[in-house]
Image: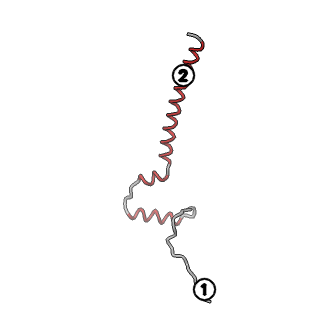
Amino acid sequence: MSRIESAKRRAGGVKRALTVLAAAGLIVTGLLARATNPGYAAAATPATGSSSSVQSSESESQSSDDFSIAPSTSQPQVQTHVS
């Protein structure tokens, strides 16, 4: 076997190993992304009753760190000026 054939064989083995490693990395990344997605975890847990959802929404509204984009439930104060 010549040096060229030996080098081609080693290069082919390295290419196959890198392909397998890249595929495994893609699968692991996809699984981690799915497991850490907050929307996925919330959708996967079924509601056990209306009382638990009321309690969780009350505790969320009392949190000072809650920066929700949900619309406000209180009515806006409207003042009119008559001239």
Dot 1: what SS?
loop
Q: Is residue 80 above or below residue 7?
A: below
Which quarter shows the C terminus?
A: bottom right
For the rendered model, the colour scheme is secondary structure
- From this viewpoint, which residue is outermost toward the right? 83
Q: Is residue 30 above or below residue 15?
A: below
Disc on the earlier residue, 2 or 1 = 2
For label 2, the crowd category at 10 Å Cα-Cα, with few meaning under 14, some 14 to 19 and many 20 or more, is few
Instruction: Give the numbered dot on residue 81.
Output: 1
Q: CA distance from mark 2 to mark 1?
A: 82 Å
Asked which quadrant contains residue 69, the reply is bottom right
Instruction: Give the numbered dot on residue 12.
Output: 2
At which x and y percent is residue 67? Answer: 56, 62
Dot 2: what SS?
helix
At which x and y percent is residue 75? Answer: 51, 76
Residue at image position (43%, 54%) is: 43
At which x and y percent is residue 17? Answer: 52, 26
Q: Nearer the viewer, residue 42 or 8?
A: 8
Instruction: Give the numbered dot on residue 26.
Output: none
Q: Nearer the viewer, residue 40 or 11?
A: 11
Residue at image position (50%, 34%) is: 23
| Residue contact between numbered discs 2 and 1, judged by CB atoms under 8 Å | no
Residue type at mark 1: give it: His
Residue type at mark 2: give it: Gly
Question: How many callouts does the rendering have?
Answer: 2
Asked which quadrant contains residue 80, the reply is bottom right
Which quarter shows the N terminus?
A: top right
